[in-house]
Image (cartoon, helix red, strand yellow):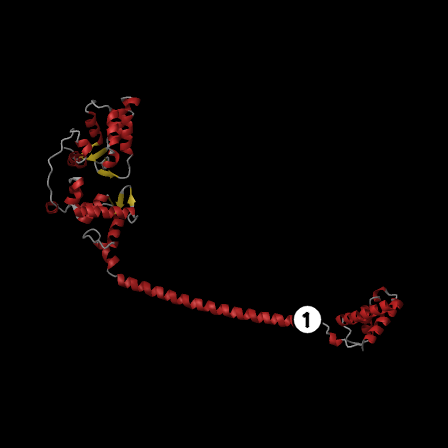
Amino acid sequence: MSLLSKEKALIENDYFQVWEIVEMLSKGGFNLWEEVGEFLGHHNFDTELTLYCRDSFHRMHEVRNDYAPIRNLIHGLHVAWLEGEESIQKIKIDIIGYYWAKHEIFNFKPIMDLGIIEKPQTQVVTLQSVQESRPDKYKFFLYKQPLFSIDECACIISDYDPLEIQKYPHNDIDEIAPDYSRAYSFISSAIEANKLNVFNYKVDADGFREYLASENIIIAGFNDQIAEPLYTKPTQARAEFEKINANLELDLAIEKNKVKKLNEEIDHLKAHIAELESKKMQFLQKENATNDQEINLTNSDLLLISVLLRMLQNEIRVKGNKSQSKILLRIEDEHRSIKGLSKSRTEKVLANANSLYKALINNQMK
């Protein structure tokens, strides 16, 4: 007797090998492989039946969201007539580790209608009898696993032994173990919502414990040790959070007020600078400009100045002194008592004088 004889017997009792079903459908060669493949494909054996895989340690695992093994089987059988009988051995080797649960086969009408499999007499099992007869020693090892299947997660929540659940007809599980069925749906939806970490179709144990605690599902001996730090002092944690948040909001309001005042001061300084710049420009313009009121000479005086300067120009042979304005400036340089002949005022006086002189000459020419 092998060390795993009990486990092997349990697999044989609860599962059909996929290839075992294929051989039943073939009836020892009476039905062609092609016909068997067509039958499997026509009745959607790839999606209608839950597929299981046995690992090298004789543990059964549900194959989820992977239809390739059965679809490859269907395709291989369908084209066996083309590739020859030798292809059957390869197909068998590829599918040998896959199983279908007997309770699903017994409730799958397309194959049961063929009469090739005898359905066992239905065993009436009540929820009360299941729960009363179940020992709890399985929890010792189950709770220590680092990973759980969805079935095991549902069993932990609903307080069922996973091995016992496997014995019940799949189609009747809602009536036999409604708590398990609800727990299974709960875990499936959590996985779809990415609230649980899944690795190779397995749920991380620590993440599962924390998730249950976050949903206020506390299971004695499983996640009650993390329930207290997570949930006994929510008010204190919340109060601390609100206190920190209030302090941060106050600091933010103070800083915003400081920024507002600084911006107001900056605007005030900009306005003051603009005012000073304007006054500076006005002062420079006033200082550099020659007011017309400063020139109070009569027309005759201006004409005299213009005539004298022109005559003086004609007499002066020095190239640098031929400009009227330069002559006046030189006069000021040589005679210290004469002041006020600034360049701007000199040019203004000469402009007015020359204008009158030009008009006088034009009138004489007429």
In this rendering, position of residue 156 left or right of residue 272: left
Which residue occupies the foreground of this view, 128 or 146? Answer: 128
Which residue is the extreme one toward the right? Answer: 315
Residue 2 x/y as whole percent? 16, 33
Which residue occupies the foreground of this view, 157 or 55? Answer: 157
Judged from the image, the secondary structure of the residue bearing numbered disc 1 is helix
The mark tally for this picture is 1
Res 294 quadrant in image: bottom right
Residue 51 shows up from this direction = no
Which residue is the extreme one toward the front? Answer: 366
Q: The C terminus appears in which quarter of the rendering?
A: bottom right
Which residue occupies the foreground of this view, 49 or 3? Answer: 49
Q: The N terminus appears in which quarter of the rendering?
A: top left
Residue 227 x/y as whole percent? 23, 56
Task: Report the residue at 26% width, 28% height from top.
Answer: 38
Task: Provide the residue designation for mark 1.
Answer: 285
